[in-house]
């Protein structure tokens, strides 16, 4: 079984050094739990920063730390204070974090931060490369390491690379703001599998790839040069059983074993049995919508004064990124707002907001989750949000209500929560009222569904699904390589060619012999191509046919002087060398007047697209249109045409950035077979790039050497990845 390694900014352990004594403290967070099962099971290493700046560490201590970490199968990437400042607090948290959370006004564009980001990403990649062997798999995590996939892939292409982004991926209009947008996308595209929490982030990523890089995307695959990248959504889960079991135990503990917090909570309920608790838990981060939440709570007390004295908001904020300016300002704002709400609505025996600015042990978290009637989760942007899931898992009596921001990834899985827009404080106040007055039966009904779902797709399922997809993509890549014309395949093709007495060579034109041009009339053969063809024609054993979807005129004039046959319009016309054009199939064009107006409306609605008219077909080209709009309209057009074609015996052909409507029953397969009839060729070679060539690959005799240009699924026997490879293959045939 191939090894799977993990790379993340932080290792799953913290290090405590006292008097040269090194203590490793395992992290209990969701990622550490989920990944620990993976890298242990697959015999891998975890590569990351141990959490201490290396400036304060002697060489000896560093070596000892590394040794100790080795025992946990961890490999450390040591970082200096300056690197942490520029790469982590800097580019990661002052540039990418605000950008990806739509806080454009907070973005720091300092090129120094970018340079440090590149340098430190390279450090992580180098450490990983030291550990990796060809054939291994590596799973890289999160926005701090966006460049690492490419840095690894370019050095070790045989390693399967996975990447998971834990935060949102923004829409193109936001992402494009960044000066280094292309570099980030390129970095991510080094991965074979890219995972996001939700389909929306996946969609945004696709649109950035399409618009910035122009790569082709079909379903959830990105096709680049010689690789296919799979992109998918994997909503991260939690260790459900751990939270549920801990919640059960909390209530079974005898009084003397209960924590101080728990005893105080119980005392509170004892004194005021009708009091209700609302819970709010996050890192203190501007993406979490904490000020909005406090304002909404104040509004609620204002609008429903009967709840003053009866409802308390317990607000836990974990200190986070305290050296970054916007976090310092946020802390000040939250402190003030808490003071404001308590000052306005509090009394001697009533504090509306209990505010804790600290991290809490797991035990206390569980006590809070299981004691609070409502969870208020109102981020303005959040990749997933695990707090919402942890609250659900801890509700062992199946009561409790979640008020949830529609801007959190988790909202896609929690339709039963009370959904709010985090910027609408009136709506949040209203939902707080609805939650506090919700009948228990309704609470249970909603909670049962939520628990079912969150339990099923827990963190172990999440990681195993990702690993399963990694294995799948690994197989896919190897099947691509298997069909690729390798040196030994090339040798055997050359031998077959040399041994043959009479050869038929079918060559598609656009995308096969020449690259695609924005304007189809610019695709004239260049000198190199002319020479390749002249050389092939010289051999009297060769019968060469260019077989294309093009019209008669351009190919005839471009290839004038060559000893070549032409089959055009996908098989409607044939012109044997030195002879006149002849119709190969029975085609008619009486349908054109009814189809042309439809295509014209698409030209009007899609700037950059145009119609090409051939004798027996009409083609809508959208290569020059804005890529996303082009794809979208192409789907619309196909849909619209489908209802028309049956009446006219027409066919729709989908080529590379073209939709072609033509008379039915005519295709390159039929044409090439007809061409071979009554001739005794003992070698047939066919090369083509798009799916109109698939007809030819399927219909030609099994012994033919069929070659697809590109990496998509194909009926051809072999694949090459570019026009340049086609040309070099043809030049080598002797
Ligand atoms: P975070 O932004 O950190 O994670 P979240 O998913 O809510 O956000 O996870 C927070 C974790 O911290 C929870 O497990 C919670 O229990 C714990 N926690 C919160 N307050 C605490 C406190 N006071 N004391 C102790 N522990 C506390 C990023 C993304 C998220 C994404 C996760 C996972 O921003 O959108 O869900 O990664 O992919």
Image (cartoon, rainbow, N blue to C red):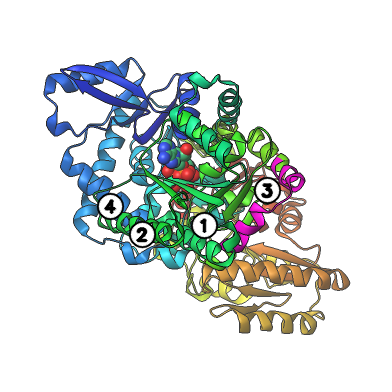
For residue 442: magenta?
yes
Q: Which residue is mark 3?
A: 697
Secondary structure beneath dot 3 equals helix
Q: Which residue is mark 4?
A: 91
Q: Position of residue 306 (x, y in %)?
A: 60, 60
The label nearer to you, 1 versus 3, is: 1
The Cα–Cα distance between marks 1 and 3, rounded to whole angstroms, is: 31 Å
Q: Position of residue 631 (x, y in %)?
A: 60, 66
Q: Is residue 48 left or right of residue 512?
A: left
Secondary structure beneath dot 2 equals helix
Q: Residues within 10 Å of mark 3 (few under 14, many from 20)?
A: many
- In this view, the residue in front, 702 or 429, is 429
Looking at the rendering, the stretch of residues picked out in magenta corresponds to 428-447
Split into quadrants, the picture shows ligand 1 in the one at top left
In this rendering, the answer to whether 451 lies above or below 71 is below
Q: Earlier in the sequence, mark 3 or mark 2?
A: 2
Q: Earlier in the sequence, mark 1 or mark 2?
A: 2
Q: Earlier in the sequence, mark 3 or mark 4?
A: 4
Q: Is residue 590 left or right of residue 99?
A: right
The Cα–Cα distance between marks 3 and 4, rounded to whole angstroms, is: 50 Å
Q: Which mark is residue 181?
A: 2
Tag 4–tag 2 contact (CB < 8 Å): no
Tag 1–tag 2 contact (CB < 8 Å): no
In this rendering, the answer to whether 605 lies above or below 230 is below
Q: Which residue is mark 1?
A: 206
Q: Earlier in the sequence, mark 4 or mark 2?
A: 4
């Amino acid at each position: 079984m191939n090894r799977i390694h993990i790379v993340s900014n932080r290792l799953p352990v913290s290090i405590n050094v006292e008097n040269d004594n090194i203590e490793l403290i395992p992290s209990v967070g969701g990622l550490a739990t989920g990944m620990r099962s993976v890298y242990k099971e697959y015999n891998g290493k975890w590569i990351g920063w141990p959490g201490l700046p290396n400036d304060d560490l002697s060489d000896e201590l560093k070596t000892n730390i590394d040794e100790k970490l080795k025992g946990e199968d961890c490999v450390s990437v040591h970082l200096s204070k300056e690197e942490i400042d520029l790469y982590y607090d800097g580019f990661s948290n002052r540039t990418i974090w605000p950008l990806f959370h739509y806080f454009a006004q907070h973005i720091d564009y300092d090129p120094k931060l970018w340079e440090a980001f590149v340098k430190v990403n390279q450090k992580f990649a180098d450490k990983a490369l030291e550990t990796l062997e060809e054939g291994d798999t590596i799973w890289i995590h999160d926005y701090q390491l966006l460049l690492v996939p490419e840095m690894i892939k370019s050095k070790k292409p045989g390693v399967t690379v996975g990447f998971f982004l834990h935060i949102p991926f923004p829409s193109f209009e936001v992402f494009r703001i960044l000066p280094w947008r292309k570099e980030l996308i390129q970095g991510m595209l080094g991965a074979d599998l890219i995972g996001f929490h939700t389909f929306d982030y996946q969609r945004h990523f696709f649109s950035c790839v399409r618009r910035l890089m122009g790569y082709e995307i079909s379903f959830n695959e990105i096709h680049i040069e010689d690789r296919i990248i799979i992109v998918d959504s994997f909503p991260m889960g939690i260790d459900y059983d751990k939270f549920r079991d801990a919640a059960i135990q909390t209530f079974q503990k005898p009084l003397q074993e209960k924590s101080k917090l728990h005893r105080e909570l119980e005392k509170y309920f004892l004194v005021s049995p009708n009091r209700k608790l609302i819970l709010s838990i996050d890192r203190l981060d501007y993406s979490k919508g904490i000020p909005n939440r406090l304002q909404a709570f104040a509004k609620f007390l204002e609008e429903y004064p009967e709840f003053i004295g009866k409802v308390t908001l317990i607000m836990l904020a974990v200190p986070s990124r305290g050296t970054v300016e916007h976090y310092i300002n946020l802390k000040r704002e939250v402190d003030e707002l808490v003071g404001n709400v308590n000052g306005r609505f509090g009394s001697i025996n009533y504090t509306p907001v209990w505010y804790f600015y600290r991290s809490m042990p797991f035990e206390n978290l569980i006590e809070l989750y299981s004691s609070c009637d409502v969870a208020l989760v109102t981020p303005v942007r959040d990749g997933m949000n695990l707090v919402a899931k942890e609250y659900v898992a801890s509700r062992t009596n199946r009561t409790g209500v979640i008020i949830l921001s529609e801007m959190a990834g988790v909202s896609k899985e929690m339709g039963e929560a009370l959904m709010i827009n985090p910027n609408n404080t009136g709506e949040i106040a209203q939902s707080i009222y609805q939650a506090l007055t919700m009948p228990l039966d309704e609470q249970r009904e909603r909670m049962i569904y939520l628990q079912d779902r969150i339990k099923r797709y827990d963190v172990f399922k999440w990681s195993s699904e990702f690993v399963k997809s990694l294995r799948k993509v690994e197989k896919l890549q190897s099947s691509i390589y298997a069909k690729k014309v390798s040196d030994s395949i090339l040798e055997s093709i050359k031998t077959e060619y040399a041994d043959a007495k009479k050869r038929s060579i079918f060559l598609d034109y656009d995308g096969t012999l020449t690259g695609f041009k924005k304007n189809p009339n610019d695709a004239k053969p260049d000198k190199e191509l002319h020479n390749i063809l002249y050389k092939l024609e010289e051999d009297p054993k060769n019968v060469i046919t260019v077989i294309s979807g093009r019209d008669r005129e351009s190919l005839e004039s471009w290839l004038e002087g060559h000893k070549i046959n032409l089959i055009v319009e996908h098989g409607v016309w044939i012109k044997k060398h030195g002879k006149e054009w002849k119709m190969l199939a029975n085609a008619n064009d009486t349908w054109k007047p009814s189809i042309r107006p439809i295509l014209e409306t698409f030209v009007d609605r899609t700037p950059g697209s145009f119609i090409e008219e051939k004798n027996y077909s009409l083609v809508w080209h959208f290569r020059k249109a804005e890529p996303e709009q082009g794809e979208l309209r192409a789907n619309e057009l196909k849909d619209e045409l489908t209802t028309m074609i049956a009446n006219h015996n027409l066919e729709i052909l989908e080529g590379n950035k073209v939709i072609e409507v033509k008379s039915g029953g005519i295709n390159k397969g039929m044409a090439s077979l007809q061409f071979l009839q009554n001739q005794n060729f003992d070698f047939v070679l066919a090369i083509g790039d798009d799916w109109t060539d698939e007809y030819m690959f399927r219909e030609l005799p099994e012994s033919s050497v069929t070659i697809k240009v590109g990496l998509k699924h194909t009926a051809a026997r072999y694949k090459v990845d570019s026009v340049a490879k086609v040309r070099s293959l043809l030049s080598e045939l002797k």
